[in-house]
Amino acid sequence: MVIEVLHFSWAHDGGVLEGGKHEIDKPSAKFLGQVAAAAACSDPPVRVVKASQEERGKIDKAVQSQAEGEKAYAKAQKDGDWHEGNLRAHIAATEARLKDAEDLHDDDKGRLLAALASSEDILEHVEAGKSYDEAVELVKGGN
Amino acid sequence: MASIVAADLVAYHSATQSDADAIAVGGAIDTLRRPDFTQISANDDIEVISTSASDTQNCTITARAADGTITSQTAALTGTTAKIFSTMGASGVVERVLQVELASVAIGTITVRRSVAGATLRAIPIGERGFSMVFRKTASDPVSTVNYYAKIFWKNTNGTNALLSAQVSESADPAGVITHGLAASVNDSGTTTNRQTAPGGVTFAGTAANVPGTDLASGAAIGTWLNMTLAGGAAAIRNTYTSQLAGSTT
């Protein structure tokens, strides 16, 4: 197969390829999977120039479709699995924002501090086994 | 049912991100990818770790190396053991991260952080695929002013309640180069011809904008266009921009 590295370099689990076209003899299934993953990115680092039908088939199966991903996202939200990661993301982002708060208005800083405290409390309840909705109500109720 | 809390208001990318010229930008919400994360504060290598041993999918990180080149690495994750991305760029360390993309949704909560066990760039929740910078690989013109456009969404992920009197505002714009404007309706899929063409019907300003219809319903999202204006010959910018969705709740 032939691939083109569109960035200065692209590293995979088997080595590093510099920008430009590369001919790969007998690519492994793992390599094809990593080419597929890279090629599926917005602004991809890699482009498949030439591949056999068999290689194309493996590449096409290696990356989850947007539709399948959206189904998994909807299920994770419905089941409540999504909330813990979302809370952790919110806490990390808010903490980072408060560390670099020179450009924030006092009102915004106060809102961020309150939001951080609220998310930390909700996460604590979720980790203790409460559902997300139960945890929010406990925090809103001052428990 | 649960009231809305700050973590329920989530920013997402639109279907087509603003990272290349000559393609249409915008579209519907992409709930698998987020436009916000905390950039690394010094050159470093990056590691990725999950709360689930099942997260062994490929992950691609694109970054700018210390010498300015764009470099990337795709590696299979190793579940609850941190996978260090150490072969990006000549020295293995990068100056800034541009994009992190999983080949399939996160099974556990995946954390992307500086290595080893350093500051978190972002946690990727279960069911999502990654994150990236909004304006990537853009440059000023030596002489003329250049405008770039990108579309993100603010979504109310609360399962029950509407965000009342919802308003999107610019919380911080230290570089002073970005303005914003809202789509004419919620849950829209409008695009613009390319990232240097203004989207039709959107008014850009630095002031707060009311969400059309006043309230942002449970599960609804409002398209938020961003306009970055770079003056002719403008110097390189490494900065942040903070958008905010606010309102009241029951």
Image (tube, rainbow, N blue to C red):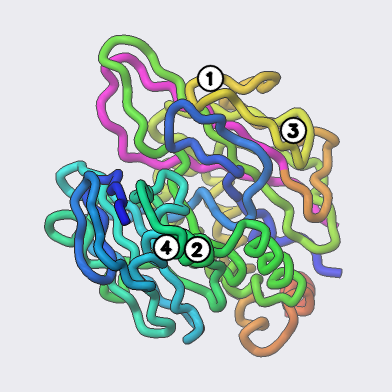
Instruction: Identify the chain of the residue marked 3, using the numbered disc in the image.
Output: B
- The residue singled out by tag 3 in the image is B210
- How many C-alpha atoms fall within 10 Å of the one at disc 2: few (<14), some, or many (≥20)? few
- The residue singled out by tag 2 in the image is A57
Tag 2, which secondary structure?
helix
- The residue singled out by tag 1 in the image is B197
Q: Nearer the viewer, mark 3 or mark 1?
A: 1
Question: Where, quadrant-wise, is the N terminus of chain A in this rendering?
Answer: bottom left
- The residue singled out by tag 4 in the image is A55
Question: In which image quadrant can residue A140 be found?
Answer: bottom right
Q: From this view, report whether residue A113 is shown above or below residue B204.
A: below
**Given the image, on which type of amino acid does mark 3 rest?**
Asn
Report whether residue B98 is seen: no
Q: Which residues are magenta?
A: B222-250
Q: Marks 3 and 4, how far apart in space?
A: 50 Å
Q: Marks 1 and 4, how far apart in space?
A: 38 Å
**Given the image, on which type of amino acid does mark 1 rest?**
Thr
Instruction: Identify the chain of the residue marked 2, using the numbered disc in the image.
Output: A
- How many C-alpha atoms fall within 10 Å of the one at disc 3: few (<14), some, or many (≥20)? some
